[in-house]
Amino acid sequence: MTSQLWLDSIAADGARITAIDPGHLALPVPSCPGWTVRDGIVHTGGAHRWATQFLQAGPESKERFVPDVSDVPDGDAVLQWYAGVNAALLDELRRHEPDAPARAFIGRTTASFWMRRMTQEVSIHRWDLQNSLPDGAEPLPAWTAADGITELTQMQIPLIVGKKGLPAELAGRVLAIEATDTRDRWTLRLRADGVDVLDEPAPGDVTLRGTASDLDLVLWRRTEPGTVDLQGDRAVLDGLLDVVII
């Protein structure tokens, strides 16, 4: 993926969020229990602010940041507040080449980390919010979803499992994921203390097949595994996702 695709995606999904009917702000968000649509907008804006703070501070900064939503206005004005925060994030991202040094919650990295992370943040929460509305949610674009699965398998899942560990019965089990529209494949071998991301396909103890959008939503626990073709031992998938609570 190119940096322009990431930036375009952040802008497009941000515009979809900004266009939500103010009359729907109080609706509950089924995929994020306890949230209203307004809560989801504030959360996503806070994540944008967080990324912007890291980028503005530079790669050598040791400062800790928390999402700053102290200026969120009451009522319908939250939509324009979010539009401004989304625009500020994009302005900051455009100041950096993708390979420019940067810092994130994982430590030293490059600006492309935040381009991808915010693409995935706004994409999944755009789906959450639209899914709460009467007309339902548009699927994730195939390339966005495939990139999201790559981020999950290469960064999010290994990071969380490395910290929490996995039940002993999952050690050595293999999860295979196959996107039927993009033809991408991802294979993870689980360990008690981590995850090995395999370069070559391997037979899975459980294999998931479906569109990249459907797969990404299952892995983010937005939809049930029954929305994709699941072959093998579902307990492997459930056991992993019970640990990787995102």
Image (cartoon, rainbow, N blue to C red):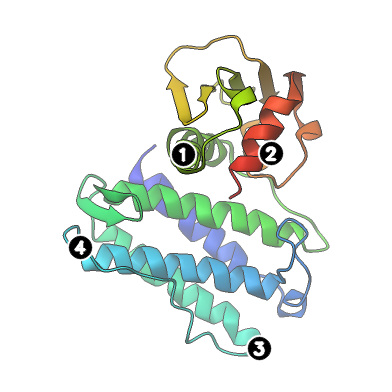
| Image quadrant where one finds the N terminus | top left
Q: Amino acid at mark 4?
A: Gly
Q: Amino acid at mark 3?
A: Gly
Q: Is residue 34 above or below residue 136?
A: below
**Disc 4 to disc 2: CB gap under 8 Å:** no
Residue 68 placement (x, y as % from top left): 43, 77
Spatial separation of the CA atoms under disc 3 and disc 2: 33 Å
Sequence-wise, the earlier of marks 4 and 2 is 4
Kind of element beneath mark 3: helix
Neighbourhood count class around disc 1 (C-alpha, 10 Å): few under 14, some 14–19, many 20 upward: some
- Which numbered dot is residue 151? 1
Tell me how far mark 4 sits from mark 2, CA to CA: 35 Å
The numbered disc on residue 100 is: none
Label pair 3/2, CB-CB below 8 angstroms: no
Point out the tag, 1 or 3, that comes first from the N-terminus.
Answer: 3
Q: Classify mark 3: residues with Cα within 10 Å, few (<14), some (14-19) or many (20+).
A: few
Q: Residues within 10 Å of mark 4 (few under 14, many from 20)?
A: some
Residue at label 4?
58
Say which of marks 3 and 2 sits in front.
2
On the question of residue 179 being in view, the answer is no
Q: Is residue 115 left or right of residue 14?
A: left
Image position of 80 with respect to 126: above or below: below
* 3D distance between C-alphas at marks 1 and 3: 35 Å
Q: Report crowding for label 2: few under 14, some 14 to 19, many 20 or more residues within 10 A (C-alpha).
A: some
Q: Is residue 73 above or below residue 63?
A: below
Q: Secondary structure at mark 2?
A: helix
Q: Secondary structure at mark 1?
A: helix
